[in-house]
Image (cartoon, helix red, strand yellow):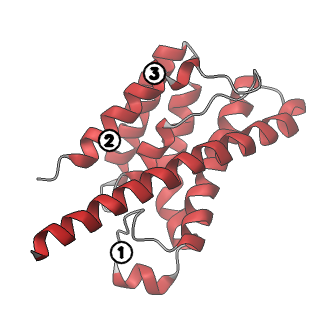
């Protein structure tokens, strides 16, 4: 069994609670990297099981932020819409070859629309629930967009790191 995804899963959640929770960029933007964990979970899992994991991750973050359930709701929402969104954004040819694509295997255009779109929706819902007013929707969309850019940059770095580890493993097996 490959333990690397579970180590990354736990490491990102721990880092969200202990490190990223304390980062405030320009006093407003707090990178919500725990959403990367939810994006990286396989699509082949049962939707109810995935939503339960999304709730558990969101609840853990809510309990550390003392935010009253907004992270749990946004995480469950992300896990519910993830299978629909992947069919909408990833090419059908790529989905026929691999119906459960890993983020490392998705081409860059599809990755930007898949991960970026889900992260934008997650962050916008999160900030809208935090403000809890329709009048603050433009501000929530702006904050969600900036956070999506920050988290997407970190996601891109993690994917490149994982690809480099895979290529090293392949090179080591050849010799």
Q: Label for residue 99? A: 1
Q: In what element is the residue under mark 3?
A: helix
Give the mark nearest the N terminus, 2 or 1: 2
Residue underneath mark 2: 8
- Left or right? Give the position of 94 relative to 45: right
Disc 3 crowd rating (10 Å Cα; few below 14, some 14-19, many 20+) is: many
In this rendering, is residue 19 above or below 159? above
Q: Find the distance from the CA under tag 2 to the CA under tag 1.
A: 23 Å
Disc 1 crowd rating (10 Å Cα; few below 14, some 14-19, many 20+) is: some
In this rendering, is residue 100 above or below 61? below
Position of residue 78 measured from the top left corner of the image (x, y, whole percent)? 53, 47
- Left or right? Give the position of 137 relative to 28: right
Q: Nearer the viewer, mark 1 or mark 3?
A: 3
Give the mark nearest the N terminus, 2 or 3: 2
Q: Label for residue 85? A: none
- Left or right? Give the position of 81 relative to 29: left
Residue underneath mark 3: 17
| Along the viewing direction, whichever of 154 and 173 lies nearer the viewer | 173
């Amino acid at each position: 069994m490959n333990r690397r995804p579970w180590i990354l899963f736990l490491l990102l959640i721990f880092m969200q609670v202990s490190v990223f929770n304390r980062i405030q960029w320009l006093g407003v933007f707090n990178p919500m990297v725990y959403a990367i964990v939810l994006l990286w979970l396989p699509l082949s899992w049962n939707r109810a099981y995935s939503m339960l994991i999304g709730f558990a991750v969101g609840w853990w973050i809510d309990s550390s932020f003392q935010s009253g359930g907004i992270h749990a709701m946004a995480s469950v929402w992300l896990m519910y819409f993830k299978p629909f969104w992947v069919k909408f954004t990833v090419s059908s040819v790529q989905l026929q070859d691999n119906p459960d694509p890993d983020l490392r295997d998705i081409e860059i255009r599809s990755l930007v629309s898949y991960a970026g779109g889900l992260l934008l929706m997650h962050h916008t819902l999160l900030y809208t629930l935090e403000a809890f007013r329709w009048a603050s929707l433009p501000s929530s969309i702006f904050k969600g967009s900036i956070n999506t850019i920050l988290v997407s940059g970190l996601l891109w770095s993690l994917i490149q790191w994982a690809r480099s580890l895979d290529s090293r493993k392949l090179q080591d097996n050849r010799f």
